[in-house]
Image: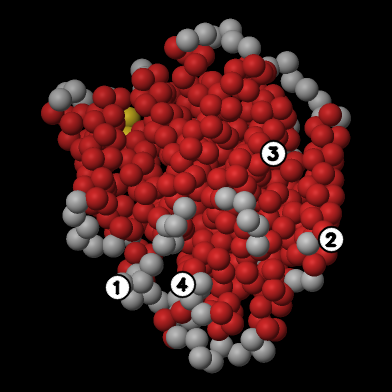
Amino acid sequence: MNTQFLVFAAITAAIAVFTYLQCRKAPRSGDDNAEYFLAGRTLSWYFIAGSITLTNLSTDQLVGMNGNQMLLLAWWELAAVVGLLILAFVFVPIYYRYNCATTTELLEKRYGKQSLRSLVSILFLMGNVFLYLPIMLYTGSLFLKSMFGLDASTLTIACALAALGSSYAIFGGLRAVAVSDTLSGIGLLSLSLLVVWLSLDAINFDFSGIPVERLTLIGGPDSPIPWTTLFTGMLFIQIFYWSTNQTITQRAMAAPTVKEAQKGVLAAAAIRLLIVPAIIVIPGICAYKLYGDIGDATFGTLVGDLLPGWLSGTFAAMMVAAVLTSFNSVLNSSSTLYVIDLHEPYLNKETNVHRLNILVSVAFVVCSLLLVPIYDGAESIINLVQQLNGLLSMPILSVFIVGLVFSGVAAGAAGIAMVSGVALYAVFSFVWTPIHYIHLMAITLVFCIAVALISNHLIFKGQARLSFGKAIPA
């Protein structure tokens, strides 16, 4: 344990020092918003790729997906490749054409209303603070607890992770986040592939005895991902997450040019296709044969048993780095949304960005910590995340689709559609669930688009016209 901790501490400190040195020598822009939230628009493609990869790949994937102990969960990552390609070739050029700092800024420029932009920002913030941040802290704490056999409570470990992770976002902004993401990503992906190999070796590359339903990519009606959902809600989930989610797109917006941004996104797509599916399902399947069904404790237990002490300390450092980078990425994007979309337009345009960023980030951290106990003991974190995410994802995505595909749609119509979609999906989630939630996401999206177009015609007397991303409404 002493060796593990020393290695863990040394690597964690080395990442922090290298990140500091890299950020210190970087050129500074005169725009505080661009500097804190877009790294001065100077991020190279490899930092974009590294940051996108590690922003998404954290303990909620490695712990949650391996915790399902079935091959089927690989579809989340395989489908993500499609979402990244859409980001690269559809959304990135549009964001740069409109010179956006936030994804929601595109909505204001397409609909011509600040109020709609603010409403969507609030919904994004709700998802970040009440869902993503606390779950990242919970799964990170669970991993460390199961790997090292710690006696501390999950909340205590979460507090330590939150304090360390938020320091990057608070004091270094997006540049520090992106650099630390990339450094951590190299180590995490390399060691995760080693875990895959050791897991396969531990079962002698023999999958006999494992139930066939855990080894198939064709999900049945009662599985986490029925195969039919690949043709309904799965694609839209990926478009929302990779193309409109501020936490992801903010990295692509920080490049100096469209081509540099696209190179970074395509590199992230290649990593997602070639490496990530293996590391989020194979260890879990092997663990089923070794330990049986042990749920979300799978990955930490496997790493602790298979890796030697000094190497498990290295892996722990990489896992903690993944938690920290994902956490500080979401925290940085949340601060970005609040400062640019809410505080400056409505409260104080000439604000001290550095001080406000600190205050807002601390408030978000405290809120997320208070919610950690709620997720403790959830049967499957990854499925819970995806299901709850539907409350916001499809209604928000509908606003982007309508705004980009049509002109002449009133912002009020889009707002009505979004609120109606949240209500409909809440009914689907908590009152009546007739079919799988991924199908229900697709139904919710179609419903929202229809409500937007119908209410635009009946209530706002508008005439929607097809005009994909071509003109800003007068």
What x and y, as percent, mark residue 220? 33, 76
Q: Using the numbered discs, state the Cα–Cα distance from disc 3 to disc 1 in whole angstroms.
A: 42 Å
Q: Are marks 4 and 2 in contact (CB under 8 Å)?
A: no
Q: Residue furthest left?
A: 458
Residue linked to disc 3: 164
Q: Earlier in the sequence, mark 1 or mark 4?
A: 4
Tell me the element at label 4: helix
Residue 3: numbered disc: 2
Residue 93 at least partly seen: no
- In the image, which is nearer the foreground, mark 3 or mark 1? 3
- In the image, which is nearer the foreground, mark 4 or mark 2? 2
Q: Nearer the viewer, residue 276 or 372?
A: 372
Image quadrant holding the C terminus, namely: top left
Q: Nearer the viewer, residue 165 or 160?
A: 160
In the depicted structure, whether residue 431 falls above or below residue 288: above
- Three-letter code, disc 3: Leu
Residue 219 at least partly seen: yes
The image quarter containing residue 365 is: top right
- Three-letter code, disc 1: Pro
Q: Residue furthest front?
A: 151
What x and y, as percent, mark residue 389? 39, 47
